[in-house]
Amino acid sequence: MPICKFCGQDKKLCNAHIIPKSFVYAAKPEDKTEKLKVLNYNLKYPSFSRIGITDRNILCSQCDGEFGVYDNFAYNFLIKTNISQYLTAIEGVNVYDIPLKDKEAELLALFFISVLYRMSISQCDMCRNLSLGSKYENLAKDILQKKINWENKGFDIYIFKEISSDKDFNEKINYAITYPLISKTDGINHYSFILNGYRCVIKVDQRSFPDMLDQLKLTNKRIKITEITFEKTNDFVALQKLALHFKK
């Protein structure tokens, strides 16, 4: 039998989800039989999927089910929750200052870390160019197996809500998904990707971001989701291509 890359046991492997199916379905509100365009920066063109991105060679059903708990929580938190009640303005910037219980913060953190981990251990075409390297892949695995706490271990997490002045385009952003792209801010490594209108940034570095950005990171008490103007981000050209070709 093949070996599950997470638990290390000889088990039958399942068709494990990397991009969770629930997020893909949320991006296809009218017809779930339609294929979704998912932009992979590495491949430079959209891929197509009805159920999300999967890999039959990485996880057993039990481990995939564990990650599914994180996927379901993140879906309910990011997609189903009305966060407008937490909206406030800080120095002219709209911020959703959301208090969290310890378990909620942990589930949200483990979701984002698990997405990167699943992509790192996968050899499917969509994920082939994403690698955390042995150090951070093992660190992610230890966190996901709850051998160590998730906070302050190099995977700081930031969430931004992307908006556009174009009303029609603003709606399409909510139906967009991209694969993580590695980049640097002040020389600090991080991955960023779009997930149904949220820009998610995950630091993969022991060093800290500048204080202004550091205060926005996910903690075990709260998350501050800041609105950013989509046209001013590096994602604009890529997401514009994706969103404008999305089925109306």
Image: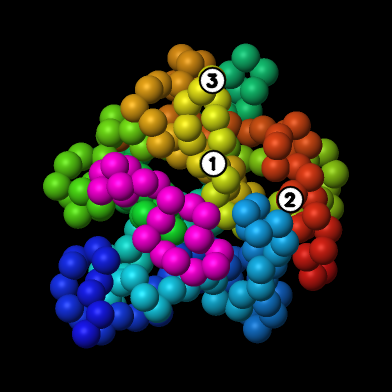
**For marks 2 and 3 on the same chain, the one whose residue lies earlier in the sequence:** 3
Give the label on residue 76, or none: none
The quadrant the C terminus occupies is bottom right
Q: Residue at x 79, y 70 (%)?
A: 247
Secondary element under disc 1, as helix, strand or loop, is: strand
Secondary element under disc 2, as helix, strand or loop, is: helix
**For marks 1 and 2 on the same chain, the one whose residue lies earlier in the sequence:** 1
Residue 93 in view: yes
Where is residue 36 shown, x and y percent of the image? 67, 71
Q: Residue at x 19, y 66 (%)?
A: 7
Question: How far is the residue under mark 1 from the one under mark 2?
Answer: 16 Å
The quadrant the N terminus occupies is bottom left
Give the label on residue 182, or none: 1
Q: Residue at x 80, y 55 (%)?
A: 241
25 vs 128: above or below: below
Residues in magenta, as a range: 120-140
- Return the residue at label 3: 186
| Residue 20 in the figure: left or right of residue 30 | left
Amino acid type, mark 2: Leu
Where is residue 245 shown, x and y percent of the image? 82, 63
- Looking at the image, which is closer to me, 87 or 179? 179
Residue 194 falls inside the magenta stretch: no
Question: How far is the residue under mark 2 from the one under mark 3?
Answer: 24 Å
- Return the residue at label 2: 239
- Looking at the image, which is closer to me, 26 or 240? 240
| Residue 17 in the figure: left or right of residue 232 | left
Amino acid type, mark 3: Asp
Mark 2 touching mark 3, by CB under 8 A? no
